[in-house]
Amino acid sequence: MEKVNTEKRVEIIEAALQLFSERVFEKTTVDEIANKANVGKGTIYLYFKNKEQIFMAVIEEGLSKMITHLNQIFSHGNYMTQLREMITYHFKFVEENKDFYKIFLKERLNFCFYDNPSKTKIVELHHQLYRLLEEFFHNGIKEGYLRLGNPNYYSLSLSGMISHFIVHWLTTGETESITSMTDTILEIFLTGAQKTK
């Protein structure tokens, strides 16, 4: 029996990531993932019970990476610097992980319906990400950087802006670095679109 090792598992996840991005989850087979990863189909089942579990591993890895980096951003510097770095990081993450983000956009609602025990972990990571952002905006209000308001709404509003900018960037040919949009989003979020008198 082939020995289970972390490196092989990572290769399978990376192969699945590319295939899920190029196609859709439903049209990707375990055989194709095995071929892409240069392993036998039986090897896949040493690490994952089924295709759904592979998909969950792809999403879990991406979300965990985001949460870890955001925690690092929020651990140093002043608040406004952290806010700017957070937006920039989201954009850099997409530039460096386009395959993951395409999958996340296409499948983030569907995965909630997959019959897979790993689903609970993914949902918890998703909630953890939003709780992290909500706490960040709560601190901004508490420290006087932001006006009084619901930190959850702040989190949802900025996340929505970032997501739609990313979708626009991905669907219009990625003609420029998306990180160049950081200042635009930051200005709109902080000052709003209404012209001051």
Image: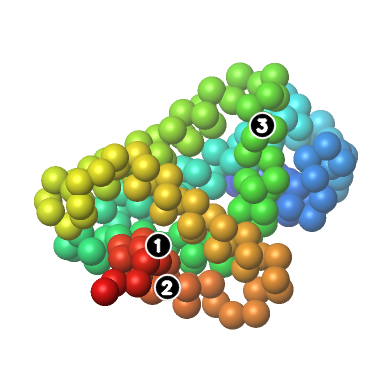
| The one of 145 and 1 positioned closer to us in this rendering | 145
Disc 2 to disc 1, C-alpha distance:
10 Å
Residue at x-position 63% and y-position 65%: 168
From this view, report whether residue 166 is shown above or below residue 39: below
* Residue pointed to by mark 3: 111
Q: Quadrant of residue 60?
A: top right
Residue at x-position 40% and y-position 39%: 130
| The one of 148 and 3 positioned closer to us in this rendering | 148
* Residue pointed to by mark 1: 87
Checking the image for residue 184, the label placed there is 2
- Secondary structure of residue under mark 2: helix
Identify residue type, mark 2: Thr
Q: Is any atom of residue 14 visible in this view? A: no
Identify residue type, mark 1: Ile
- Position of the N terminus by quadrant: top right
Return the disc, 3 or 2, that comes first in the chain's sequence: 3
Within 10 Å of disc 1 (Cα), the crowding (few <14, some 14-19, many 20+) is many
Q: Is residue 133 left or right of residue 178?
A: left
